[in-house]
Amino acid sequence: MTAIYDKFAKQYQASKRLPFREYIEWYSYNKLLGDISQKSVLDLACGEGFYTRRIKQKTAETVVGVDISEKMIRLAKQQEENHPLEIDYVVSDVMQLGKIGSFDLIVASYLLNYAQTKEQLLKMCQTISANLKPGGRFVSINNNPDQPPESFPVCEKYGFTKRISGPLKEGEAITYEFFRGGQKFHFDNYYLSTKTHEWAFKRAGLNLIRWHKIEVSPDGLKIFGQEFWQDFIDYEPIVGIECLH
């Protein structure tokens, strides 16, 4: 996985400028985060630090970002050098991270959908649990396991596509392809059911599990209109997740 992301780190960084990232993804994520002032935050699968920096700017007290890709972390550290926010970055596979602290909040955008088996998903959740204070929260934006494959083509007008070779079944690869400014790159996520996610959360000691629908921001509706976003709203390619420790 690290080699895959090393190949297109800058293209992935550029994909954060797609409109759905700002007007749906970040808007929904930000609402889910709520007030995090003076909180300690661990950002797992932080990539190049796009949301890590925004989380720190929400007046979080301390923020640590972790990603498996050295090139992603290099991009994150370059931004930190250019515009210091006192964020620490670590290169590590989340499943092998172990305990590195005790955090009020752990966040992860598109981490859980890289688990190919329920055992891998459990390892990710155990890492989350190990680093979360009692009463702390886990918040995630993730691939929606309940999106029907026949609706995958509707994503194209938003700058990405999803493909699957057969029906949804545990561990089946879902190929994402992003395209922006004439450039394309693709990578695989994996399907694990909502039931499997909830099993892993509970097994790792994460409770009060909530699945949150995504929303379009008022600015997004004003600029693009309701009709443009309707397929995204109807078929929900992404979903918010919240758990308590």
Image: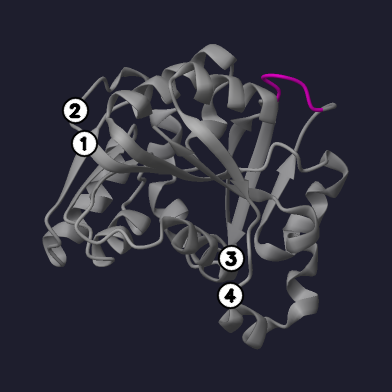
Q: Is residue 5 magenta?
A: no
Q: Position of residue 168 (x, y in %)?
A: 79, 27
Q: Which mark is residue 217?
A: 4
For residue 173, above or below residue 214 = above
Residue tagged 3: 24
Residue sitting at 34 percent across and 63 percent down?
35
Whole-percent x, y for residue 79 in the image: 21, 60
Q: Say whether marks 4 and 2 touch (CB < 8 Å).
A: no
Vertical position of residue 2 compared to residue 107: above or below = above
Give residue 149's mark.
Answer: none
Give the alpha-carbon distance from disc 3 to disc 1, as whole Å. Answer: 28 Å
Q: Mark 1–mark 2 contact, CB under 8 Å?
A: yes
Marking on residue 90: 1
In the structure shown, which secondary structural element does the residue marked by tag 2 occupy? loop
Say which of marks 4 and 1 sits in front: 4
Kindly indicate whether the residue at mark 3 contacts the one at mark 4 (C-beta within 8 angstroms).
yes
Upstream in sequence: badge 1 or badge 2: 1
Q: In the image as oriented, which residue stretches furthest toward the right?
A: 150
- What x and y, as percent, mark residue 182? 59, 63
> Quadrant location of the C terminus?
top left
Q: Main secondary structure of the magenta part?
A: loop
Q: Is residue 193 visible?
A: no
SS state under label 3:
helix
Instruction: Identify the residue at horizontal 67%, vertical 42% (top origin).
Output: 144
Asked which secondary structure carries label 1, the reply is strand
Residues shaded magenta: 168-172
Q: Which residue is mark 2?
A: 100
